[in-house]
Amino acid sequence: MTFHHKSLIIFCALLAGAQPAMTQDDKVTGSVDIYKDFDARLLESNKINLSPTLPPIDTNTVRQDYIVPPRPLTIDYEAPQLRPLGMRSGKKEDPYNGFAKLGGGVPKTFWGEAGYYFSSGEQFDGKVWVRHHSLNADNSVENQRFFNN
């Protein structure tokens, strides 16, 4: 079975290689002489006048008979029982009161952010937040250095 596949692949490769040999070799080269421009004209024709007419109005009323099979109009069914679905609450996670983020970049870009939340029962709560963003390009560009605190 493998032999047939190999021979088929070889035949297709030879056929593809022979394709350029069968191309047109006698190309027409030279110039084209134009004696006059193309002038498209329609021949004279007689206009056909058509006057549309409406069909006569049919005022006859057609009696239509419908056959409706009888169906029960009252359906007895039990009222559904509505009850709430109980869902368990998720596990309560421990709160984190503080966080910190640090970062850096090129050229000499530093970024940092930190915060902390503290409380004393229901009477007092507060937070401290610090942020710093700076860039220093060694004075190669005027007004390039900045700090955002």
Image (cartoon, rainbow, N blue to C red):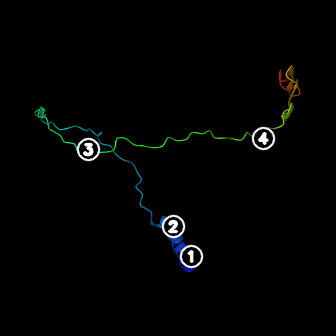
Q: Circle 3 sits in a helix, a strand or a loop, which is it?
A: loop
* Quarter of the image where one finds residue 120: top right
Q: Quadrant of the N terminus?
A: bottom right
* Quarter of the image where one finds residue 126: top right
Q: Circle 4 sits in a helix, a strand or a loop, which is it?
A: loop
The residue at which mark 2 appears reads as 16
Is residue 72 left or right of 115 when viewed as pictured? Answer: left
Disc 3 from disc 4: Cα separation: 61 Å
Task: Please state the horizontal and vertical placement of residue 77, each as a whole percent of the image.
Answer: 45, 43
Is residue 71 left or right of 114 when viewed as pictured? Answer: left
Residue contact at pointers 2 and 4, CB within 8 angstroms: no
Q: Which mark is residue 67?
A: none
Disc 3 from disc 2: Cα separation: 72 Å
Task: Please state the horizontal and vertical placement of residue 91, each as a whole percent of the image.
Answer: 78, 41
Chain-order first, disc 3 or disc 4: 3
Q: Circle 2 sits in a helix, a strand or a loop, which is it?
A: helix
* Quarter of the image where one finds residue 25: bottom left
Disc 2 from disc 4: Cα separation: 70 Å
Q: How many discs mark residues in the rendered view?
A: 4
Residue contact at pointers 3 and 2, CB within 8 angstroms: no
Q: Nearer the viewer, mark 3 or mark 2?
A: 3
Residue contact at pointers 1 and 3, CB within 8 angstroms: no
Residue 49 visible to the viewer: no
The residue at which mark 4 appears reads as 91
Chain-order first, disc 2 or disc 1: 1
Which amino acid, mark 2?
A: Ala
Chain-order first, disc 3 or disc 2: 2
The residue at which mark 3 appears reads as 68
Which amino acid, mark 4?
A: Lys
Which amino acid, mark 3?
A: Val
The relative height of residue 21 versus residue 43 in the rendered view (above or below) is below
Disc 1 crowd, CA 10 A, few/some/many (<14, 14-19, 20+): few
